[in-house]
Amino acid sequence: MSLVVVTPELVSAAASDLASIGSGLASANAAAAAPTNGLLAAAGDEVSAAIAAAFGSHARGYQALTMQASAFHEQFVRALTAGAISYGIAEAANMSPLQQLLGVVNAPTLALFQRPLIGNGADGMAGTGAPGGDGGILWGNGGKGGSGAAAQPGGAGGAAGLLGNGGAGGPGGIGAVGGSGGRGGLLWGGGGAGGLGGSGAIDPVTLQVVPGGNGGSGGAVSLWGAGGMGGAGGQGIVAPGSGVTASGGMGGAGGAGGVFGHGGAGGAGGLGAAGGDGGAGGQLWGTGGDGGKGGSAAVGLNGGEAGRGGNGGNAGWFGNGGNGGLGGAGYGGADGVNPPSTGTGQPGNASFDEVFAGNVIVGPGDAGAAGPAGGGGGAGGNGGTAISVAGGTATGGAGGAGGQAFGGGAGGNGGVGGNADSFSVSGSGTAFGGTGGNGNAGGPLGGAGGTGGPGGNAQTQNNGGTASGGAGGHGGAGSAGVNGLDGGKGGAGGNGGRGGLIAGDGGAGGLGGAGGGGGVGAAGGAGGDGGHGGQGVADSGTAQGGIGGDAGTGGNGGKGGNGGAGGVGGTGGAGGMLLGNGGVGGAGGLGGIGGVGGSAGAGGAGGAGNIGFSFNGPGFGGAGGAGADGGTGGTGGNGGQGAAGGSGGAGGLIGLSGASGASGGGGAGGQGGSGGTGGTGGPGGDASRQPGLPGAGGDNGGQGSSGQPG
């Protein structure tokens, strides 16, 4: 016996398709007519003419047949179209009495029970969280629940009557639970699916994170039918700049089977939340539902712990237990990031210039102001100029030190040393250029060191005194880079459901989730360069060029984050008491890979020595400053520990115990970061008699150690 289902729409569509086919055939026949009907003879002889005439005759015969076929095809399409129209008219004519009859039948039940005898329940209005209407008492599906407004649960699905499926629950509003699925028919029908949990959000008033809502539970059934699937939990959200993860909603539980029927599967968990448990199988016969998958961990500073898989549903008297859900995967730890500078502190005030007949000593410039939170230090103030007009000693002011940096800001640069000039028409004088200010160390989060200030210039005029250029300031040290953060732990697998009390295999345990990888360490800050020495110039006395300042060392690279541990595998479900094998234990999750260590900062270059020149006396160039060592590369993160597999379930009186799950492998350790390049020594200064020696170069930094495997 075969069943044929026909509707007026299907017949009309078939007629339209046939008309399109006929149009295509007519176009093809017309295209072939010209080259085949008028075939020319290959040569002027009688044989060629006879062959051409034969082909032309066949072509004309074919065209005559196609014209007859086209006419038949057109008549058939017209007949089919007319039949579809007549069919539709007949359907409409028959529908009206049936609707009237159904209205008469449903009127008493609507008046007494507020539900029809036959018919589907009405859907709940969207945005209200209203429940779906119940289906007809005799036959009909429940209506779908309406979606919830913000923070409002979704509406429950309507229940079916004697025969029919329950309505699906409505999705919850922001942060609210999804509606429960409606109950299936008393005699036959599946339970409705649970509604989705509402998504997470940020409360605009309190600025607090609202976690995602839980998924709604699936609808149960009474006698025969499958339980509804649980709704998925709502996704969480990460608040900007908070570094914490908001929990997603848990998955809803699957609905239970009736007397005969399978349990519904649990819903998947939202970010970092557990999956829902599978529904129980039918009381007499039926398989338990599978547990829902645990939610993966969300992005945060550290990779959060992932959600656990839901447990499989237990069977009734006869049937297999449901499988445990998979544990969620841990999220990778965030890479270390040196924060950008948020500004620079104010520069220090310069000291005043002074002119005096005799010894003149000018005070130093003020140190630069500390930077704002997360900002670089201000530059040191410049030293003042000292001028002696009577052959005394002139000492320029020292440059101020660079200001302190915070966060990832660069250390403040040193101020410029003040110039010195001793002038006399008789006798001798001495001039000492001011020392350049030292650069400050970089901020503690990977900031670069400040540059040392240049030394002040010195000169003597019209006397036989000594002119010594000021020494350059030392460069500030770079700071270590920010460490990478640890990866999140994988979620545990759900346990398998128990097999039927009499007979049935236990469900398999869920696989543990893999751990997240560790974050990469950030690069260390570069060391500051040394300041160059000041010039020493004399007309007849001794001239000494200023020595260059030593450079600052490079910062060490940040440590790589450790890999997250894998999730434990779920335990296999026990087999039936009389007959049944135990479920296999779930495999443990793999450990996450350790993060790579950050590269180290380069050492700063030494400051250049400056010229020492005397027109009528000895001149000595200043020595170059020493280059600084590069930093050591960051240590790689350790690999995450692999997790143990779950135990196998016990077998029944007749049956085998389940095998234990394999343990997850440990994650590989992260590679160490590269060492920083050593800074070059500063060149020595030129001189009228003896040039200065160049400064020593800095050593390269060491390679960072690799992390240990998990």
Image (cartoon, rainbow, N blue to C red):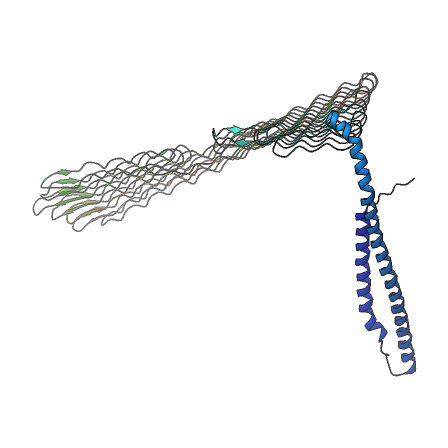
- Quarter containing the N terminus: top right
> Is 307 placed left or right of 479 in the picture?
right
The answer to whether residue 5 is left or right of residue 539 is right
Residue 136 visible in the snapshot = no
Q: Is residue 92 above or below residue 141?
A: below
Residue projecting furthest to the left? 426
- Across and down, in percent, residue 213 comes to 60, 28
Front in this rendered view, residue 630 or 93: 93
Quarter the C terminus occupies = top right
Q: Quadrant of residue 509?
A: top right
Res 577 → quadrant: top right
Quarter of image, res 348: top left
Q: How many marks?
A: 0
Closer to the camera in the image, 71 or 532: 71
Residue 361 appears anywhere in the view: yes
Q: Nearer the viewer, residue 668 or 96?
A: 96
Q: Position of residue 30 (x, y in %)?
A: 81, 68
Give the x, y percent position of residue 234: 61, 31
Q: Position of residue 299 (x, y in %)?
A: 55, 33
Q: Is residue 317 left or right of residue 399?
A: right
Left/right of residue 274 with respect to residue 141 in the rendered view: left
Eyeballing the image, is 623 above or below 518?
below
